[in-house]
Amino acid sequence: FPVTIGGVTNLPSLKAQQKVLGNIPGAQDVLGGFYGKRYTEQIQPAVDRFLSSISPLDDPMTAGYRGQQALKTRLESLQSAREQAAKPIYEQAFERSPPIDISGVAATLDQRMRIAKGEELSELKRIRSMLNRDVTRLNAQGDEITETVLENRAPALQRVKFAIDKMLRGEAASSMDKTIQNEIVGIQNQLVRTMEDAIPEYGLANQEFARLSEPINRFMERRPGLSLINMSQDNLDQFAGKVFGLTTPASPQSIRYTRQQIEQSGPNGPIIWNEVTRSYLESVWQKAMKPTAGATEAKVDAGLSFRNMLLGDEKRVKALQAAMSPQQFAALNDLSRVLEAAGRVKKLGSDTAFNNLVLQAIS
């Protein structure tokens, strides 16, 4: 789209003359009309075309929802892969498992429950009840009776361990006192040690499970697990901003990791990532277009602001390179060069004396 000679050459003298001419009655109207027409008929459509080339989806709420669902699907996939790989290992470990004596674990719980109160007592009772099972036998008279005994089957005790895991990760855990959490962790560790002592193969299975858990732990420790999958649906229009960083730009490594997780969520993963990327770029464009306080006219240098917000420093450049394909980034670079040229009108502040000098030079 059309740019001025000062914009094309970036020569300070020509930009200064263009600025001064814009303050002269008559010329001011001409240049003002030129800037406004170029903004509405050239710059804005060019940016819109670029955004559409990234993704046709222009609804940030939908992009956020699809991005979050993709991450949840990816997490489920990682967990499923771990379960499938670990299941035969545990089955083999439990195949010839002897009865396991967990009386020590039960004694620890009984001792703690004698002094526990409130929430702590409720949680300890919950675990203690899981260590029991009902068995049916015949008494001396030959009658069938049911009695409660300590659980001693390895697969069942493994399920107790999983149930405690869930207690420590569930919604209630976020409000649970740290002292209580530590106490529950200690009891769980005692249960696991008891099982490992009885079944050496179980200890080896746990080591393999820990190795298989590394991708999941990495997911939960980074932005997808810490923030993105937990965003409320009402705030999903801000999802892309969370991915790329709202105030402080996210690191290229963080963006690259989130991109990988979304793209690997399924066949539509790359499409969904482009939707999230477009949502972020569009939010920056909306911010660039926002007039300054008290302004009565459109922000005709919004294109330059857009360019500077996206590519103003090396970190932002690397972040976008991590987010975009080489072709997409090349298209952004091409657009940014034209936007930069179109926005080259130096703002000189209070420039009455300078204007007089320039007018003499060009008269």
Image (tube, rainbow, N blue to C red):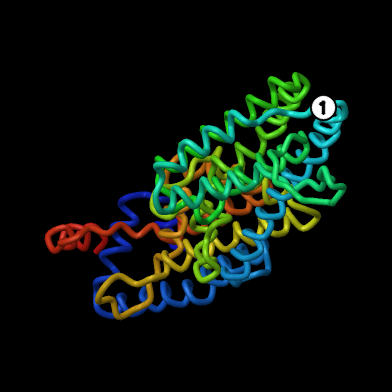
Instruction: Name the residue located 59 percent from the left edge and 28 percent from the top edge.
Output: 104
What is the secondary structure assignment of the residue under circle 1? Answer: loop
Q: Can the viewer see residue 227 in this picture?
A: yes
Instruction: Name the residue located 37 percent from the left edge and 73 percent from the top edge.
Output: 31
Please rate how many residues cluster around mark 1, counting C-alpha atoms within 10 Å: few if below 14, some from 14 to 19, many from 20. Answer: some
| 361 and 171: which is toward the camera | 171
Residue 280 in percent (x, y) is at 53, 59
Instruction: Name the residue located 64 percent from the left edge and 59 percent from the top edge.
Output: 67
Residue 193 in percent (x, y) is at 63, 25
Residue 97 in percent (x, y) is at 82, 27
| 53 and 342: which is toward the camera | 53
| 272 and 284: which is toward the camera | 272
Q: Is residue 69 above or below residue 248?
A: below
For residue 86, which quarter of the picture? top right
Q: Can the viewer see residue 224 in this picture?
A: no
Residue 283 in percent (x, y) is at 49, 64
Which amino acid type is marked by label 1? Ser
Q: Which residue is mark 1?
A: 97
Instruction: Name the residue located 65 percent from the left edge and 31 percent from the top edge.
Output: 102
Count of numbered badges drawn on the protein: 1
Residue at the far front in the pictured view: 141
Q: Quadrant of the N terminus?
A: bottom right
